[in-house]
Image (cartoon, rainbow, N blue to C red):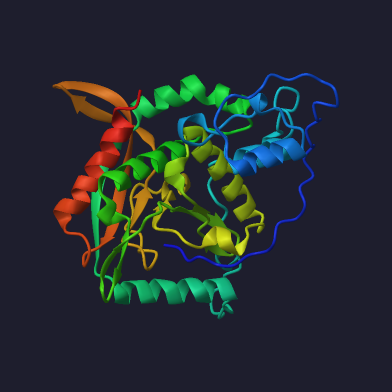
Amino acid sequence: EKSPTIVKTPTQSTRPKPASNGPGKATRRYTGRISPVVGRIAEEHQVDLNLVTGTGRDGRITKKDILAYIEEGDQRSYQPSKTQVATTAPPSPSKLAQEAIPGEILALNSMRQAIAEHMVRSKRTSPHVTTVFDIDFTAVDSHRNAHKQEFKRDGVNLTFTAYVVYAIIQALKAYPIVNSAWTEEGILLKREINVGMATAIADGLIVPVIKDADDLSLLGIARTLNDLSTRARNSQLLPDEVQGGTFTLTNHGVSGSLFATPIINQPQCGILGLGKIEKRVKVIDDAIAIRLMAYASLTFDHRILDGASADAFMSTFKEVLETWS
């Protein structure tokens, strides 16, 4: 349940800059494919592209990758502090909740008013229906434990959310109708896959958007999530970074919630809510096992989707996560 809002412009970064290779220092020629923009930036900043980790499709170096490398410095000599790594700690209660005094009327700030207006408009606009699936995260947990140190060396905190976003992308590719919007002329199928990530902040909720998410690898998704969630909580997002979403994820499980029926972020077709990931007893082939489980709920616009289509989308989402290797 979330509402995009415009927030403050980011302040200048204080992270160390990478040292250039220096004049006359030989480097290996980079043989991978890059865009002209990446090539120009590398030349201007004397960056050895062999040292940059690509997060684009097939490991291709994107503009965001090289800019992150320039800003963060060479990860071989610079390790980020704990405060620079996004975590999934439970969000703090909103100021309105903390300041509540029985018998008084709390004045509404602009964010709370915007959220209220959006929620009411969404419920009036779309017939909301929710379907809930039980997801086994055991395979994802094994992969994460095997690779999180590798990601950490690249300055990235590998969270379960990154895997969930990746699975959403695969399901949206399989069922493009979910990546759509209702219009008077018909159902508009979106060309881009832009995944919004609801983030709790002091005054309410904000939804930073991962643009062209289908062009990113798991590393790229994790890096972008770390960056957007950290800057969202520090009120450093740009207006463009909270606009243009085509599908939204709300990870309400970080607060301990098991499952929810989130409200659609208009004019999108659906929103996926992820509950708390926890160990539960599960019967597998007539045997009792302890598995890492979570409930995932898809709230969808019934004008666009029927139950069978929504469940097919969720079945693909579930399969991607449960068969991770």
- Give x and y (percent) for residue 192: 41, 53
Please name whichever residue, 225 or 34, is drawn nearer the observer in this view of the structure. 34
- Give x and y (percent) for residue 151: 56, 27
- Give x and y (percent) for residue 24: 85, 22
Image quarter in which the C terminus is found: top left
Q: Is residue 83 visible?
A: no
Q: Is residue 274 left or right of residue 23?
A: left
Please name whichever residue, 65 or 205, is drawn nearer the observer in this view of the structure. 65
For the view shown, which residue lies furthest in the right direction? 23
Please name whichever residue, 293 or 76, is drawn nearer the observer in this view of the structure. 76
Q: Is residue 106 left or right of residue 253?
A: right
Q: Residue at x 63, y 58 (%)?
A: 237
For the image, the number of numbered tags is 0
- Give x and y (percent) for residue 296: 31, 46
Q: Residue at x 32, y 72 (%)?
A: 123
Q: Is residue 61 left or right of residue 317?
A: right
Query: In which quarter of the view is residue 45 placed?
Result: top right
Query: In which quarter of the view is residue 238 placed?
Result: bottom right
Check the image and report above or below for 138 versus 160: above
Q: Residue at x 19, y 48 (%)?
A: 311
Q: Residue at x 60, y 60 (%)?
A: 202
Q: Is residue 144 visible?
A: yes
Image quarter in which the N terminus is found: bottom left
Please name whichever residue, 226 or 221, is drawn nearer the observer in this view of the structure. 221
Check the image and report above or below for 325 versus 319: above
Check the image and report above or below for 270 versus 57: below
Check the image and report above or below for 222 versus 236: above
